[in-house]
Image: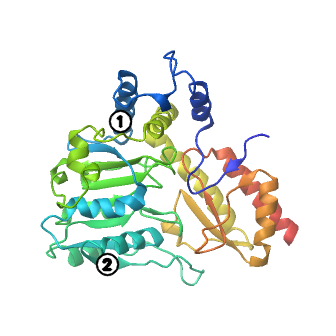
Amino acid sequence: MSRVWNFSAGPAALPESVLRRAAEEMLDWQGKGLSVMEMSHRSPEYTSIFEKTRNDFRTLLNVPDTHEVLFMQGGAVGMNAIVPLNLLQGFEQAAFVNTGAWSKKTSKEFSKYGLARVVLDNANTRADASSACYVPECGALLDRVNGQQMAYLHYCDNETISGVEFTGQIEALASLLDCPVVADMSSNILSKPLDVASYGVIYGGAQKNIGPAGVTIAIVDKALLNRALPICPSAFTFGTVAENGSMYNTPPTYSIYIAGLVFEWLMEQGGVAWAQAQARNKADLLYNTIDQSSLYNCPVRQQDRSRMNVPFTLADESLNSKFLAKAADQGLVQLKGHKSVGGMRASIYNAMPLEGVQALVAFMREFEKSEA
């Protein structure tokens, strides 16, 4: 059968050209007679793949020399423990901004290692039009964080479940805070330019906007590499991973290879600037369709809507199953919302072309007409 339009929140769609190239190289990578899956991570062949992947990532995000790029494992959920284990030496608490399910999970995990101070909170993941999901006013952070001996301030830049995304509010305040900023950017990294120097740590699992599940990328300020607690496992200690070039233990080699192909693809398209423009075009098309409808509703305040994950509900929830079944018949899959909030969700990461969103919008309009 032909390929479907995959709106999964993660593991998510990959560029078709990347999948085709990986298929072509599966049995024989560049005439070497073996698959990347079979290569020693210390071989010259794999070293060339790894170094290019890391360099391309640094180029795409303009990562300064002050920061290391680490390839790790465990995903963002693993980072919920790895970050405090690496940054709590000399501190007892950290500050958290809760805007949804994932940031809330992060602060809960931190409580195993220190005192989690929630300084801004809007963690409602089930919201209707009268109680919209939103990004709280961030100016209050200066009074609530500074002078409090916080190890760091953590926030999730894009909430995949509730569909809330920051637009640089905390990045703009970073230089005024007296602690490093740590950001989970699993689901929107490489979709917009970043001032990486403003962050202490940026991390993200690959399976949404970078590549397949298995590799986690962390961008870490070198000044923070030696703040790990003694109990931090060596394989997860930022300083150790950096000293060993992300090769302290065997890395997820094939996931890194695919990520490298995605980085090449993105650079060919026009880099992060292209991704940002595409994300805006796709999101605007889908949100405009929802806002102009009497059947669909988005529970996120307009200025805080994610460009990556678009949640929406149907005015008549009894139509949910019918909507999903008919969408699947049209090759539009993985549109069911997260189990904690229900409704629908369309994830439109970098690899989702405009044509896929156009197909979804055409279906949504036709479905609404048929149910009028």
Instruction: Identify the element where label 2 is drawn.
Output: strand
In the image, residue 155 above or below residue 189: below
Q: Looking at the picture, how far across and down is residue 102, in whole percent? A: 44, 68
Instruction: Identify the element where label 1 is drawn.
Output: helix
In the image, residue 278 above or below residue 310: above
Residue hosting label 2: 118
The Cα atoms of the two marked residues, 2 and 1, are separated by 34 Å
Residue 127 in sight in this render: yes
Q: Looking at the picture, how far across and down is residue 344, in whole percent? A: 66, 67
Query: What residue appears at the point 48 percent right and 45 percent down from the top-left corner?
Result: 210
In the image, residue 317 above or below residue 153: below
Query: What residue appears at the point 78 percent right and 69 percent down from the top-left corner?
Result: 321
User: Which circle marks residue 247 in the picture?
Assistant: none
Q: Residues within 10 Å of mark 1 (few under 14, many from 20)?
A: some
Q: Looking at the picture, how far across and down is residue 187, in whole percent? A: 48, 55
- For the residues bearing labels 2 and 1, Cβ distance under 8 angstroms: no
Q: Looking at the picture, how far across and down is residue 202, in whole percent? A: 33, 54
Q: Residue furthest top?
A: 31
Q: Nearer the viewer, residue 46 or 177?
A: 46
Relative placement, left or right, of 157 versus 64 is right
Residue hosting label 1: 54
The picture quadrant where one finds residue 2 is top right
**Residue type (three-letter) at the residue carrying disc 1:** Arg
Query: What residue appears at the point 54 percent right and 72 percent down from the top-left corner?
Result: 300
Relative placement, left or right, of 37 versus 80 is right
Relative placement, left or right, of 358 versus 233 is right
In the image, residue 217 above or below residue 184: above
**Residue type (three-letter) at the residue carrying disc 2:** Val
Residue 169 in sight in this render: no
